[in-house]
Each structure stands twice: as C-alpha cells, then as structure tokens.
Image (cartoon, rainbow, N blue to C red):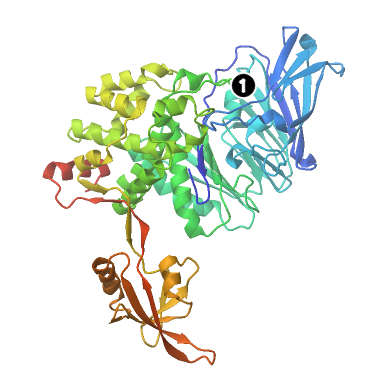
C-alpha cells in the first residue's frame, strides 16, 4: 500500500489468487446497490455444503500489504444464519471477526449488513484506499470489506451478483460473465482472487488503451468533475510503455485496471494514496489542481503497477499462504515495497519521464526522510514486526527500502562493469520462482548471493539483516555522484524576517515579522520598514545578498550592529529611524546535496550512463 500523508506520502497492498476448487459447490454472494440506507448495504451469501457440525465464518482481521490490524468485522451487523427451510441457526460471536455457526451441516444462507468505512464514527480509521464507500452516487468496494468466508474453505469458487441502477457502471479486473443494464455477475476462483479485485461503481467515465499485449482500463469518479479518465490515461500511457521497456519489452499481464476516486470532502485518515492488486490499482486522491495531481498520479501508478513483479511473481510462502486472521510477516519488505518504489522512480528517469536532476532530487529527499526513522533498526527486523513493536517504522519502506534497492543496483552494476543490475536480477528471480512457486523466507539472500556475487550477500548481511548504516557517499561515488549530507550549523542571523522590494526605489521592505527571532526583536523591526542602510552600507536589490553574506563573515556574536530604515509616522510620511542591537547566532539547517561529480572518472561516467540509460 502506498500512503500519501499531507503532503502525499506513498502505500500498497497485494493479493495472490488461490487454486480453483475441484468441488462443484460455490459461494453465491448477492448485493443490491439500489437499497442503500444510512451508508449501509445488506449482503446475502449462499454457502457451499459443510460437513462438520460447527464452523467459523470469518471477516479479515488484516489484509496483505496494509501492515495494520483493521478488523473489518467491526463494520458488520445483524449477522444471521439460516437452513434451507429458512429456520435460523444458533451462532456465537467469538471475536469481532469470527462467528461460530452451530448445526453447520444444515447451513444454507448467511445474511448481514455492511457499514462503510469512509465516514465511520469508529476509532482505528481505515486508510481509504483499503476501505469502503457506500454512497448512492458512487461505491468503492474493496471486497474484503463486504464478503467473508467459511474457515478452511477459502479456495472454493465465488459468484458475486450485484444489482445496480442503470446509470452506473462497475469497473474491476474480475471476470464479468453477466453484464446487463442493472445486473452484473462476476466470478472468482477463490476468496483470494475475489478480494484481489476491487470494484468501483459510478457514472461511467472510462478510457481504454493498449500497451502492446496489455489492455489498460482507467475509470475515474471525480465528485466535482475536475479529473477525467482521459486525462489520467494520457498521463500514464507513456509511463506504462516505459515500464514495458524496463521489464524487457513485454508486460507480464494481459489486462490492468486503474481506479481513481476523488471524494467530495477530506478523508478521515487525513491521507491519500493507493491500493494495489495483482491486476488493478485503486487510487484515492484529493480534489486539487491537475498540475498538483499529475506527478502524483504518475508516481503512484508506477509504484502500484510494479507490484505485478513483487509480490505477484516473486513472493515468500508467508505471502502466498496469507492468513487473514493470524498473519505471518515476511522479512522482505525491502523487496516488496522498497524495490517496487525504487523501480517506479528509476523507470521514469531511464525512459524519459523524469529528468536526471528530478531523479537525484527524489533520491536526496528519500535519504532525508529516512533519517526521521530509526536508522539503527535492521530492515528484516522491521519487516517481521511491522504489525507490532515496529509499527511506527513501517513507512520507512518507501524511503530506506527504496535506497536499499538503489545501492544494490549500483553495487551490481559496479561488480558487472555495467552489464547486470537489479532489472536483470528481478527478471532472473521471476523466472526462478513465478506466481505459483514461493520462496523460503530465510533463504532468499543466499539465493541472490549465489545468482550474483559474494559481495551482494555481504551487502544484505551488513545493511539489511544487520543495522549498519548505509554509506551512501561510497555508493554514489561509484557512479560519479557527489553527496553532501545535510548539517546543522550556527551562524549570525538577520532577524528571520521576510522581504519584498519597493517598486520605485528597489529598496528592501519588510513584509512579515511573524517569525522574527531574538535579534530581529532587539533591533525593533516593524512590518513596512524600508531598509536603507545596514551595517553602514546602503542596501538595495542589487547588493543585498553580497552585503548580508559579508555581514555574517566579518562579525562575531555580541558585535553591535546599526541599521537605518524608513518608517511611516502617524501622518503616513516616511522618516528615518535608527536601529541597533548586538548580534546573536542561531541554528541553521543546511540542506543536503546530490549532484553529478565534476571530477568523475571515465569508468564512473560509464556506469552512470548504464545506470540511468543516458545516451
């Protein structure tokens, strides 16, 4: 899941389909979207035959990729079970997500009411791309919020029947076998496949395009009509063509659906972002200018789409056999989220969707954001315990996780003299494993080390399994980049005031003293003051930068500084006012820098060209 807090942050979620049951029995789920009441919908489930005397019906406690316990059973009410004659069966509520059904051999139908998550009064808000919205004008249906399953019977096929108004259209990656003006029927081979494909019902605004073998459908609901599916399609088509090139010239799926939902008001979670599945993505975005949304849509879609590689084709047994009630975490979030985020950015710069300077700025920002988290925490430890003791560190997968992928890429290119990087490594892993062959969680680092170089295995040991800080400068030098870490220094202050320029005289005028510091207050600056002289020198737009820098260089703490300003008196006339105060120093944060190194060797330049596909 890629989450965008304000401003946007990255999140992603994934599912892997199960096998079709050999039994003839199926679940039949019925939902009527025309009967909304208080943002609630009734759900009816005709269940397969049950052989045991009692059985649990379960709703997910957690779904893969959210890395947070959400307890979707909280949104279920009026849960009832019936036999074929319509007699009600006894049930016990074991937990908020688990109901024990007695006389289960007689079980025929289950009914319950679902409340949506977008405007709930309940605590533990569900991040909207992982939630549900039930409104008469639009429905966001993450199906794990609507449909449960019988314990031990998740591999049985499911028919989903949805009634809707004629003005609405349901977009999803699920296979639709009945499609009428008011009735749809979808089929899934298992519960895993069903919840792998969200559905969005709304007034139709869809655009379809092809990227060679893959049909891509975009569906948009924008409550104020500020965003259209055509605009989104124009944005992401070049991007998906770039991703095709990154993946070797062909996409590994033949269909993909992008759902975009813009709510009419701000989200309860306070964030925006996306939810990814094997064959689709669900984006929940704010109503904002197209300029603001454009790059965010590209970044998010690139990230979500790359999940078709991880975890769809490369995943551990913990992911393949996901337990919705008692999940086991994998130690490889660096792969599932970190490598995915890195590939999403690298693709854009390699194939002309982002400039090199923009890419370096993205990487530099990820380094700075990563330091907001615990750098002394081993990434495998973070992954294994992201649901409990390290839950507050999870978002670092989009920062340090991506940087792990970047450093691994540079290391591979260095060792192979530019012939082999993470693109080739991921393709090799996909060939070795694939959708139906999960890897052993504890063996992956050894496998990659054997596939590549011993130094790569050492990298995983030092910087992923252990908590040794990554020496970014050393990796950047391999590809001819210069990295200067940020720092906090003390320097003389001008008072922390903001300036404008007078039109007539090109003198500086104080626009704001809202954040004025101790020196500014001692000087007695006021809004509207026009700076005439500072430290004995006349100041204007031409020389102020040079003179203010000189002031900091030639004075020390405690020196007396004089200034002359023009200030309006009570009659509105300008008069000269003399100001003075002793200098003080303040903490100043110097931003980090990442740029091409002017003294790069031929080999460094050559590796940088291989890395970023520079012609």
Residue at x-position 28% and y-position 71%: 551
- For residue 122, which quarter of the picture? top right
Q: Nearer the viewer, residue 483 or 608?
A: 483
Which structural element holds mark 1?
A: loop
Q: Position of residue 610 (x, y in %)?
A: 22, 41
| Placement of 577 over or under 286, stated as above or below | below
Q: Nearer the viewer, residue 492 or 312?
A: 492
Q: Position of residue 226 (x, y in %)?
A: 58, 58
Left or right: 19 in relation to 496: right
- For residue 545, which quarter of the picture? bottom left
Left or right: 283 in relation to 157: left
Q: Nearer the viewer, residue 375 or 398?
A: 375
**Does residue 249 appear in the picture of this structure?**
no
- Specify the farthest residue to the left: 602
Residue at x-position 60% and y-position 12%: 22
User: Label 1, on which residue?
Assistant: 325
Q: Position of residue 264 (x, y in %)?
A: 65, 53
| Placement of 49 over or under 292, stated as above or below | above
| Placement of 443 over or under 376, stated as above or below | above
- For residue 424, which quarter of the picture? top left
| Placement of 255 over or under 286, stated as above or below | above
**Does residue 233 appear in the picture of this structure?**
yes
Q: Position of residue 375 (x, y in %)?
A: 38, 36
Residue at x-position 35% and y-position 24%: 429
Residue at x-position 71% and y-position 16%: 56
């Amino acid at each position: 899941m890629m989450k965008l807090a304000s401003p946007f942050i990255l999140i992603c979620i994934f599912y892997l389909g199960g096998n079709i049951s050999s039994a003839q029995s199926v679940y039949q789920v019925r939902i009527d979207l025309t009967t909304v009441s208080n943002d609630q919908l009734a759900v009816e489930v005709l269940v397969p035959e049950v052989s045991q005397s009692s059985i649990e019906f379960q709703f997910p406690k957690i779904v893969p990729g959210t890395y947070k316990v959400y307890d979707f059973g909280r949104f279920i009410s009026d849960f009832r079970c019936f036999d074929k004659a319509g007699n009600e069966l006894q049930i016990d509520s074991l937990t908020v997500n688990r109901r024990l059904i007695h006389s289960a051999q007689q079980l025929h139908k289950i009914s319950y009411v679902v409340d949506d998550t977008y405007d709930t009064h309940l605590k533990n808000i569900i991040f909207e791309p992982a939630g549900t919205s039930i409104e008469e004008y639009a429905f966001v249906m993450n199906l794990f919020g609507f449909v449960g399953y019988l314990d031990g019977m998740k591999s049985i096929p499911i028919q989903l029947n949805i009634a809707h108004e004629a003005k609405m259209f349901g977009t999803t990656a699920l296979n639709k076998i009945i499609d009428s003006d008011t009735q749809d029927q979808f089929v899934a081979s298992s519960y895993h496949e069903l919840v792998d494909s969200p559905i969005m019902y709304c007034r139709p605004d869809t655009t379809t395009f092809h990227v060679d073998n893959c049909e891509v459908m975009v569906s948009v609901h924008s409550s104020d009509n500020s965003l259209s599916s055509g605009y989104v399609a124009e944005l992401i088509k070049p991007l998906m063509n770039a991703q095709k090139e990154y993946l070797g010239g062909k996409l590994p799926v033949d269909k993909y659906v992008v759902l975009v939902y813009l709510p009419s008001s701000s989200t309860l979670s306070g964030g925006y972002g996306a939810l990814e599945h094997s064959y689709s993505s669900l984006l929940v975005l704010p109503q904002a200018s197209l300029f603001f949304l454009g790059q965010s849509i590209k970044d998010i879609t690139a990230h979500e789409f790359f999940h078709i590689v991880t975890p769809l084709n490369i995943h551990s047994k913990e992911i393949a056999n996901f337990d919705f009630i008692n999940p086991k975490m994998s130690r490889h979030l660096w792969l599932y989220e970190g490598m995915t985020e890195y590939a999403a950015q690298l693709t854009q710069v390699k194939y002309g969707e982002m400039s090199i300077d923009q890419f370096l700025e993205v990487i530099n920002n990820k380094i700075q954001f990563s330091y907001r988290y615990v750098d002394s925490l081993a990434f495998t430890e973070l992954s294994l315990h992201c649901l409990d003791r390290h839950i507050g560190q999870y978002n670092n997968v989009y920062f340090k996780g991506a940087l792990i992928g970047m450093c691994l890429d540079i290391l591979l290119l260095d060792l192979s003299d530019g012939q082999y990087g993470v693109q080739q490594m991921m393709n090799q892993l996909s060939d070795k494993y694939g959708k139906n062959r999960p890897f052993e969680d504890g063996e992956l680092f050894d496998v990659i080390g054997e596939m590549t170089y011993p130094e790569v295995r050492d990298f995983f040991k030092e910087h992923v399994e252990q908590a040794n800080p990554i020496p970014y400068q050393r990796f950047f030098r391999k590809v001819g980049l210069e990295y200067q870490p940020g720092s906090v220094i003390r320097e003389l202050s001008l008072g922390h005031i903001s300036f404008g320029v007078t039109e007539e005289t090109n003198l500086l005028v104080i626009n704001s003293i809202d954040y004025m510091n101790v020196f500014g207050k001692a000087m007695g600056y006021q809004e509207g003051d026009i700076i005439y002289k500072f430290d004995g020198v006349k100041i204007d737009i031409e020389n102020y930068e040079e003179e203010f820098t000189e002031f900091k260089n030639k004075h020390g703490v405690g020196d007396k500084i004089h200034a002359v300003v023009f200030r309006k008196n009570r009659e509105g006339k300008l008069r000269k006012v003399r100001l003075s105060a002793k200098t003080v120093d303040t903490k100043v944060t110097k931003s980090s820098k990442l740029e091409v190194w002017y003294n790069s060797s031929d080999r460094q330049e050559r590796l940088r060209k291989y890395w970023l596909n520079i012609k």
